[in-house]
């Protein structure tokens, strides 16, 4: 089968290697923004292996890309990590159409970043869904769905890597199934929900409203794609990349969410959350670099100070007991 892969790297590297080794890969297409941000430059490495490449942007997708696709005449186009909508006019060009690999359940987790929302919501499982691409976002018929567990404490990057390793076998199954139209099933309209790309507000810790568990989920959902969950200390923005729950403590009374309860250069940095539960800040990213919580204490952070939700929120201080 003659296959074109539209993908982002390194997410698609396993898929690329399988198709290349199987001698079914005809060409690689990448989105222009993704190709500029790729490090190392996978596109250059792919070109060195003699694979034809095409860089897509929102201007050429319905002109040069359409003409190139007509000339190439592939049997199938596989899409894995692509933010542009595929125009309806080109969906019929490949013999078996376009298939999208979606890192989430459908139809309840449509949108550009399904893994973020699964982890932020504290879900214990998700899925890799391979579906037809139609004229709307993530609404095409489903070819196959493979469940994937989310282990407590896993970050977005960890789950993304775990899913990427599964792509070889799932792609092999999809290629076998795609040749029979009876293998597709319609998506349910009752469970459908479209999650937009998270805003800066949605990747910021709300100390007053979020519980310790919810903050941990948000931190994990923001690592590494969003550089961590945002918060502010003494008016300066920082991002938290890893936290640990403190499950054995008795809830603290009379403390403010975001208040630093303990800051010690050996024991670490502990912060009060909603309902008086503590979390330990393990890894922090700031102007001083990416530091452990214990190293961050050396910068002058103090017990009784507050982490705040907004830049202009007045940081109150409390007496140290």
Image (tube, helix red, strand yellow):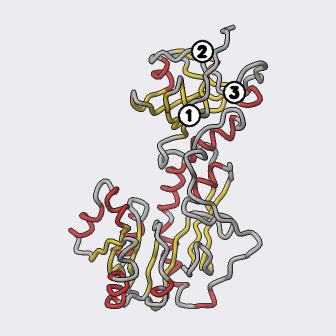
Between the C-alphas of marks 1 and 3, the distance is 12 Å
Q: Position of residue 255 (x, y in %)?
A: 73, 20
Of residues 316 and 205, the one nearer the viewer is 316
Please tell me whether mark 1 sits on a helix, a strand or a loop.
Answer: strand
- Residue 154 visible to the viewer: no
* Residue holding disc 2: 303
Vertical position of residue 125 compared to residue 101: above or below:
above
Pointer 3: what residue? Answer: 257
Residue occupying the point 49% across, 74% down: 85
Label 1 or label 2, whichever comes before in sequence order: 1
If the image is split into quadrants, where does the C terminus sit? Answer: top right
**Percent of width and height locating residue 257:** 69, 27
In primary-sequence order, the first of circles 3 and 2 is: 3
Task: Give the CA distance from mark 3 to mark 2.
Answer: 13 Å
Nearer-the-camera pick, 53 or 204: 204
Do labels 1 and 2 touch, CB within 8 Å? no
């Amino acid at each position: 089968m003659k296959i074109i892969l539209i993908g982002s790297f390194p997410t698609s590297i396993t898929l690329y290697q399988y198709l290349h080794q199987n001698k079914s890969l005809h060409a690689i297409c990448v989105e222009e923004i993704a190709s500029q941000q790729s490090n190392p430059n996978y596109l250059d490495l792919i070109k060195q292996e003699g694979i034809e490449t095409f860089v897509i942007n929102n201007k050429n997708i319905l002109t040069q890309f359409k003409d190139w696709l007509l000339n190439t005449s592939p049997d199938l186009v596989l899409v894995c990590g692509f933010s542009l909508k595929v125009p309806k006019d080109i969906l019929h060009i490949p013999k078996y159409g376009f298939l999208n690999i979606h890192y989430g359940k459908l139809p309840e987790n449509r949108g550009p970043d399904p893994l973020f929302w699964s982890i932020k919501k504290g879900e214990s499982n998700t899925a890799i869904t391979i579906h037809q691409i139609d004229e709307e976002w993530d609404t095409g018929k489903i070819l196959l769905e493979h469940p994937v567990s989310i282990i407590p404490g896993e970050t977005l990057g960890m789950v993304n890597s775990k899913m990427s390793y599964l792509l070889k076998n799932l792609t092999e199954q999809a290629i076998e199934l795609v040749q029979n139209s009876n293998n597709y099933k319609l998506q349910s309209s009752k469970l459908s929900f479209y999650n937009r790309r998270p805003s800066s507000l949605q990747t910021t810790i709300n100390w007053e409203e979020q519980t310790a568990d919810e903050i941990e989920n948000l931190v994990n959902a923001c690592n590494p794609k969003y550089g961590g969950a945002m918060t502010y200390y003494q008016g300066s923005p920082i991002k938290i990349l890893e936290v640990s729950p403190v499950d054995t403590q008795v809830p603290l009374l009379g403390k403010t969410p975001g208040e630093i309860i303990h800051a010690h250069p050996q024991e670490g940095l502990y912060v009060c959350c909603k309902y008086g539960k503590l979390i330990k800040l393990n890894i922090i990213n700031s102007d001083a670099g990416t530091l452990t919580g214990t190293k961050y204490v050396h910068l002058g952070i103090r017990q009784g100070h507050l982490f705040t939700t907004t830049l202009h929120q007045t940081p109150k201080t409390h007496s140290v007991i």
